[in-house]
Amino acid sequence: MPVVTLPDGTQRTLSEGSTAADVARAIGPGLAKAALGARLDGRTVDLSAPIVQDCKLEIITDRDPAALNILRHSTAHVMAEALCKLFPETKLVYGPPVENGFYYDIDLPRKLTPDDFPAIEAEMARIVAEDRLFTRYEMPRDKAMQKLKAEGNPYKVDNAERAKGNVLSFYVNGAEPGRYWEDLCMGTHVPSTGRIGAYKLTHIAGAYWHGDATQQQLQRLYGTAFTNKKDLAAYLEQIEEAKKRDHRKIGQELNLFVIDPMVGSGMILWKPKGAAIRLLLENHLRGELIKNGYQPVFTPHIGGLELYRTSGHFPYYRDSQFPPLYETDRSRILNELWVAASARPDNAAISPTEQHWLDELKRVDRPAWEALLSDAGPAAQRFSSAAGGTAHNSRLIREMLSGQDGFLLKPMNCPHHARIYASEPRSYRDLPVRLAEFGTVYRYEQSGELSGMTRVRGFTQDDAHLYVTPEQLQPELQGCLTLVRFVLDCIGLTEYRARIGLHKEGDPKFIHNPEGWAQSERAICEAAEIAGLTATREEGEAAFYGPKIDFVVKDCIGREWQLGTVQADYNQAIRFGLEYIGPDNRPHRPITIHRAPFGSMERFVGILIEHFMGAFPFWLAPVQAVVVSVSEKSEAYALEAAGMLKNAGYRVEADVSAEKIGPKKHRVRQQKIPYALVVGEQEAAARSVNVNDREGQKSETIPLAALMELFERSNKPPRPPATVGER
Ligand SMILES: [Zn+2]
Ligand SMILES: [Zn+2]
């Protein structure tokens, strides 16, 4: 009889045929009522799943982060049934849960519009009210394929062909298979339709089958679901609020940035006002960096391919990079040959791809081809077609490429910084070396994934690399965390949490370095604790070369954004042969820390635009005030006052147009400029200004000197609360 171990360590012996639901009931009626699913040895399953062997069991209730996925996926089934009932010609394709909701891709000749939503939702309400059990049944693969083919939905046949295993499962929206609507599905589902608390259809988008633009075009119907109406209402309000705050819309209204198809999608053109914000942020951060012992450096936007062969960025991340820039056909072909030759398993002879590139080389650059294959020279200089030649060929081609290589638009700043570190001898006394750069990098994101400033193809990281000794790892990580906290607090993003990514024992994805992992994971967890961060630890989420901390920031409408990251790296020093001479007079490998508090300037400013809804605080506002003249008679004074403020370093404009004062003030407010400074004849005579804030709350007349004091007080980031562990 199976024994289950519960999260608190207690064990229960089950009778034959027991399910997770039985365990929940045995623990207590409250838990049974709240249960939505279960986790068997870490795998999410239905409550009705039979428990056949000893396992760890966890009951999933609505407080569990996995609950919403189960609920939303179940709601997608209810929506699918409703669609099939209302539009019988509907062919269902695929319906997963996604962040914030779910969708179902459908093939339906009739174009759905939001006007159809009430009818679909009403049909869903009927199914939910009937509180039908979700029932799973399984079939041997061949029988299931026969059944699906007979049903005639090619998409489901395709899904089944892609599914793994010898058994396929189906879910019925009811207790009796055959009587109720059903769908091919792996699960997991809530126990019954009545458990779906609150749901709403949100929007429709186009989609292609398999995400491939050459395939059938589909309609993607999105919805969301929550366990209760209150959460749904809060979420819908958040969406409405987010629409008002969309940085693409505000960025255009306030002239902050533009994306120009002639320049390229995913490329941000910072207009003067957006650039002003970015510069202020950069300067603010740069000041802190210098105080904390960082040294600014500059590096070019491209780097030789040998740099990226050394770092490992080429060719492994080719799909997400712009294609290399080659000076000659020879370097293009030799690089392709190198990629193919290095990929050859050591026990294999030459591959057709290698042969193809050798033939190309022969056609384009006969002398190079001869040099590579000629019998005249020593065998050590010759390309090997036999098994066992992989390392030799790879080295040989790299040598041939030296001096006539290609370039890559840089996908990362790290390799350039590693070469700066390597450019001079380093002693333990020189460490830590902290190299900082606002470095622009380029990634080839799929065009469908580009969005405003938050998903782009070129972006500037507020990057830095620290080279440290093992003893310095913990204090330096802590310094990085304190710096990130300082920066976020200053900007008013005070709600954040951290995710610590740890490696997973035995997973080949992570480099083999047991001592390093133990040391760095201890260091990173300690640093987070001392820095006073609320942090969760996530096993298996480390970078392959070391543990990391990601910052997740909550904006003022409660949305979470992943921003900066701090990572420890044992691999870079090995790849680049970085060293320092220790107190023992022998060479040692430094550990690299990668860190970027904002992540990228583009994304960060995009998030700030939404957070502030364009109304940047005084110290960050691209235009801080406009001096507005009431009439011609105060024009000279308006210009004089604006000039004085500009001379004092403030970003101030004057509006002395002939327009009425009302519309002039309105325009200042609309542009989210902190102050409209109105001057008429009286103000001119008294050398004062009438100060109007953008909220429309304050209007007072004060002397120019008092205004200067007000500006001086407001022109810096608010001093954040003192953080624990500050150095
Ligand atoms: Zn399902
Ligand atoms: Zn890096």
Image (tube, helix red, strand yellow):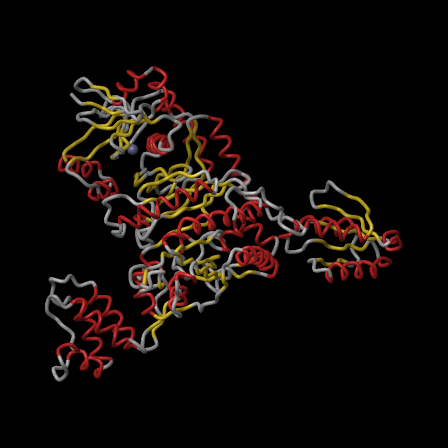
Quadrant of the image containing the N terminus: top left
Q: Quick one: 420 or 203, which is closer to the camera?
A: 420
Residue 701 shown left or right of residue 185 in the figure:
right
Q: Residue furthest front?
A: 584
- The answer to whether 33 is drawn above or below residue 169 in the figure is above
Q: Can residue 82 be seen?
A: no
- The answer to whether 706 is drawn above or below residue 363 in the figure is above
Give me the residue at 43% from left, 44% from top.
Answer: 527
Question: Could you say where residue 80 lies in the image, as x and y percent from the top left?
Answer: 34, 33
Q: Can residue 517 be seen?
A: yes
Q: Quadrant of ligand 2?
A: bottom left
Rendering quarter of residue 197: top left
Question: Could you say where residue 405 lies in the image, as x and y percent from the top left?
Answer: 32, 74
Residue 125 shown left or right of residue 169 in the figure:
right
- The answer to whether 508 is drawn above or below residue 150 in the figure is below
Residue 506 shown left or right of residue 715 in the figure:
left
Residue 614 shown left or right of residue 337 in the figure:
right
How many numbered marks are there? Answer: 0
Rendering quarter of residue 310: bottom left
Question: Could you say where residue 302 lies in the image, as x and y percent from the top left?
Answer: 41, 68
Question: Could you say where residue 552 lies in the image, as x and y percent from the top left?
Answer: 46, 43
Q: Quick one: 396 or 49, which is closer to the camera?
A: 396
